[in-house]
Amino acid sequence: MEQEQELLVVGRVVGVQGLKGELRINPMSDFPERFTRPGRRWLQRRGEPPQPLELLTGRQLPGRELYVVRFEGVADRSAAEALVGRDLLVPAADRPKLAKGEFHLLDLVGLEVRLEADGAMIGRVSDLIHAGNDLLEVELSEGGRRLLIPFVEAIVPRVELAEGWLSLTPPPGLLDLAEG
């Protein structure tokens, strides 16, 4: 039996490609080798245990933020369709080393969100959405509303991972856009 290990979500299966079992992956990682280098990966449906499988091949679609991958044992379109919506995981221990001041985007989930102007805590990062530009989903402390914040330096000028927070300098009206 395989030893328990911590896994890290690096992408999501968003569709099928063709008729031979290839899958489209929306990456949540800036490291292409996670989608192109053959080896062990895991797929997980929310609320279920992760299932191991072997990545055989992978390539990025030209001009797109999508990867097309092929897994061992997924040989036709119907087998591929059964995997749409699952998260793609890798061992957390395989995280690439970063330079000082860099961080993994997924480490932002759970951080406190503070206003740069006065340090007031307004919520927590609840998710990261990778759709061309990275968006932080922030659950606001008051009312539990959710807000999407573009993850750009002008709006998120400081990230203090060790202290567990990041700061916002929201443009006028941004905080009023929260969904209830």
Image (cartoon, helix red, strand yellow):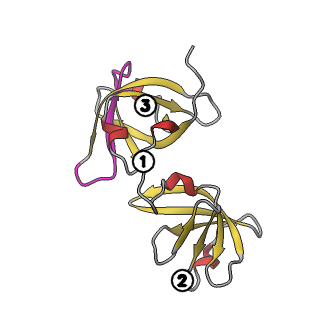
Report, in whole angstroms, how far the alpha carbon at label 1 lies from the one at label 2: 33 Å
Residue in the foreground of this view, choosing between 165 and 172:
165
Does dot 1 land on a helix, a strand or a loop? loop
Q: Amino acid at mark 1?
A: Lys
Q: Amino acid at mark 2?
A: Pro
Up-down: is 23 above or below 180? above
Q: Earlier in the sequence, mark 3 or mark 1?
A: 3
Q: Residue furthest right?
A: 143
- Tally of marks: 3
Residue 73 is covered by the magenta coloring: yes
Q: Which residue: 75% across, 67% down?
A: 141
Please identify the quadrant where the C terminus is shown.
Answer: bottom right
Kindly identify which residue carries mark 2. 171
In the image, the segment drawn in magenta is: 62-77
Up-down: is 71 above or below 87? above
Identify the image quadrant of residue 123: bottom right
Q: Amino acid at mark 3?
A: Glu
